[in-house]
Image (cartoon, grey):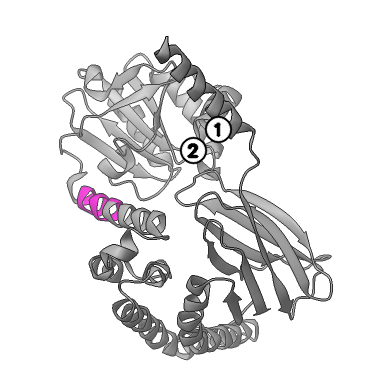
Amino acid sequence: MKKRVYFIGLGLAALMAACQPAQRATISGTLSGIESDTLLVRSMSIGSRDGGQMDTVPMKDGKFAVQVNDSVVKRVFIFEKPSGNKAFSMQAIELYLLPGKPMTVNGSMKAYTLGGDAFYEACNQLNAELLPYMNSLDSLGSLCVQMERDGVPGDSVRRAYAPAREWLNAMQEVRCRFIQANADKDVAVYALSRDLSWENLGKMLDVVGESARNGAMAPVYANLKQSYERIMARDAAVERIKEGAEAPDFTLKDLQGKDFTLSSLRGKYVVLDFWGSWCGWCIKGIPDMKKSYEKHKAKVEFVGIDCNDTEEKWRKAVEEHQMPWLHVRNAGDPDVSTLYGIQGYPTKIVIDPEGKIAKVVVGEDPAFYKYLDSIEN
């Protein structure tokens, strides 16, 4: 009897928690130099694949305020919403909003200061050290664009842009020194996330102290570490995924939720099609894939491996485009795209009946269809 009361209590607690409003924190401030009267604010959970939430935020006299769900650490981007026929600018303020820590942002899109918490204020130091280099890069970029418009030869434009490499290297050094000087602070993880090269990221992951790895920015550190390990594994796989090499076996869930194992198709030709509903070239190639499937399905098994999609988007895309072959979803455990060293989408890999890699084609390339035609002869 006591157990029953206990479980009813748990259910009631869960129901009450579900009815509670989501935790929200405010990002507010004043931004100058913006022609539009509206901002676009995108917020997303760390490691999210769904694009997060986009809020349209009005401004008055440069002032703005937006509430963001901050139950977990959020990565936030603030853009200027274009007005009229003005092109969309990719320039953005990039922030990390900590749970329960409202933030202020004051200044301009290029030069701004953060407030509201010691972590935000610590970010200002790194941003200030990087700003002169960023301004120099922006100015040089504008100059080179104008040179191209004026018809200046490409070699001259490239020579003019040469100092950029030195500045980019200097920015890498600034970030690494900052991490070393603040290794035990949450802001070290912020610096770790600011466009470090893969080589420097690998080095600095070990420099960050345990208190920072497990502190407020722990989800960001874990995501960066996972991304680095995935890239290293992918690069190692690229060296192994060669024509004539053994195709790595894997097991993924199909549309019915059943396990599909690659080796179950041994004795047949198999096409592994790495794709995603977000990939324009993948979608564009579906009609040709359908024709090829109908032509070769007696001898070749097609396996669509969906990557970087939510399950809902994957299922919707398969149904919408009526792709009749076998489909599985690469949910990341195991990460089959890493296992096969996939560097671009779509990538099509043909495996022969003995389980060897016979052909690798990156992109929507007629070479893939020509190869399938050749194995029928």
Instruction: Tell me residue 272's x, y (percent).
Output: 34, 31
Numbered badge on residue 167? none
Queried whether the magenta region covers residue 153, the answer comes back as: no
Is 285 rendered above or below residue 124? Answer: above
Instruction: Tell me residue 259's x, y (percent).
Output: 32, 19
Q: Residues within 10 Å of mark 1 (few under 14, many from 20)?
A: some
Q: Using the image as rendered, state which of residue 88 and residue 303 is in the foreground.
A: 88
Q: Amino acid at mark 1?
A: Lys
Q: Amino acid at mark 2?
A: Asp
Instruction: Tell me residue 274's x, y (percent).
Output: 39, 37
Left/right placement of residue 119 relative to residue 222 reads right
Left/right placement of residue 287 relative to residue 200 reads right
Secondary-structure class at tag 2: loop
Left/right placement of residue 207 relative to residue 323 reads left
Q: Is residue 251 visible?
A: yes
Instruction: Tell me residue 261's x, y (percent).
Output: 27, 22
Q: Quadrant of the C terminus?
A: top left
Q: Which residue is mark 1?
A: 313
Q: Is residue 108 visible?
A: no
Range of the magenta residues? 230-238
The CA distance from mark 2 to mark 1 is 6 Å
Numbered badge on residue 309? 2
Is 181 rendered above or below residue 266? Answer: below
Q: Quadrant of the N terminus?
A: top left
Is 250 rendered above or below residue 166? Answer: above
In terms of image quadrants, where is residue 366? top left
